[in-house]
Image: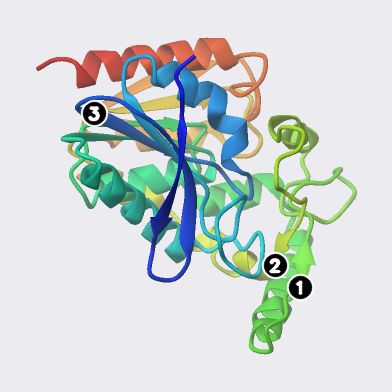
Amino acid sequence: MTRSDRVRIETGKGKIDALHYPGEETCIVMAHGFGAVKDGLIPFAEIFSEKFGVLLFDYRHFGESEGEPRQLIDIKKQLEDWKKAVEFAKELGYENIALWGTSFSGGHVLRLSSEIDVKAVVAQAPMVDGLATVRAIHSIGNILTLTALGIADKFASIFGKSFRLPIVAEPEKLAFMNTPEAMRYLEIIPEGAKWENSAPARIALSASFYRPIKVVAKIKCPVLYVVGERDTITPAKATLRAAEITPKAEVVTFDGGHFDGYLELFEFCAEKEYEFFVNHLEKD
């Protein structure tokens, strides 16, 4: 097992906590999905670190990273954190950078790679279209309720407060994710991780408008889309459409839902992703 070092990355507005698995020329930068923490991705990082350097980080407001309120999901801040993590990897001496993202961060790596030069990208069960995801998870009534609660939370933030909702709950309860498979989310959070099942509701105001699919045609590097055919969180139809318009896309599908890639089908997905990185990062 490759040893990792805990590092702190300065953003200018709080420090990011990360695990660095030392490598040579290439570093794979990784981060977690919607409301999760990096602890659940350590198995992926350990596999990739057999051949490459890896930098696995928590966004501000999550895990061991700084930031209040806790568990705040802010698209702009998370993209800023990605850029800081990439800059940090370059400062460590890595010449080549690759990105790995999953679910919400799967959308982030697509967005980021359309803007900066990276060598390869893996997007596992990525949220390519916030509108498609919201429609897949919620009824119109729930969407209106979440929007109202998001407005209430945004107003509360003026006074340093936050109105919070569960990240995941059973289908009959209001939460950011409440499809029948959603409770499997809890299985990807390791015991003892610094995590709570809640987040400020204001993300409901921006999630639908976050559509990385709009920029994937600009990505110049190879991209591997890993797609669950029965995904009820990030619908396969939207992801496959994104792959169609990505210039250098490769697609791996698996017969499972959103969380199977972390759980029962972890070995399958990690192996395919590792092979993709080897194929595209060791050509020179």
127 sits left or right of 283 in the view: right
- Determine which quarter of the picture holds residue 228: top right
Q: Is residue 145 left or right of residue 87?
A: right
For mark 2, what is the residue? Answer: 201
Q: Visible in this render: residue 113?
A: yes
Instruction: Give, as a three-letter code, the residue at label 3.
Output: Thr
- Looking at the rendered structure, the secondary structure element under dot 2 is helix
Q: Earlier in the sequence, mark 1 or mark 2?
A: 1
- Place residue 183 in its image quadrant: top right
In the rendered image, the residue lying farthest to the bottom is 159
Q: Residue 205 placed where, x, y %?
A: 59, 69
State whether residue 228 appears in this view.
Answer: no
Q: Using the numbered discs, state the Cα–Cα distance from disc 1 to disc 2 in whole angstroms.
A: 6 Å
Q: Residue furthest right?
A: 172
x%, y% of residue 263?
66, 20
Q: Which residue is mark 3?
A: 26
Label 3 packing within 10 angstroms: few (<14), some (14-19), many (20+)? many
Location of residue 62 by image quarter: bottom right
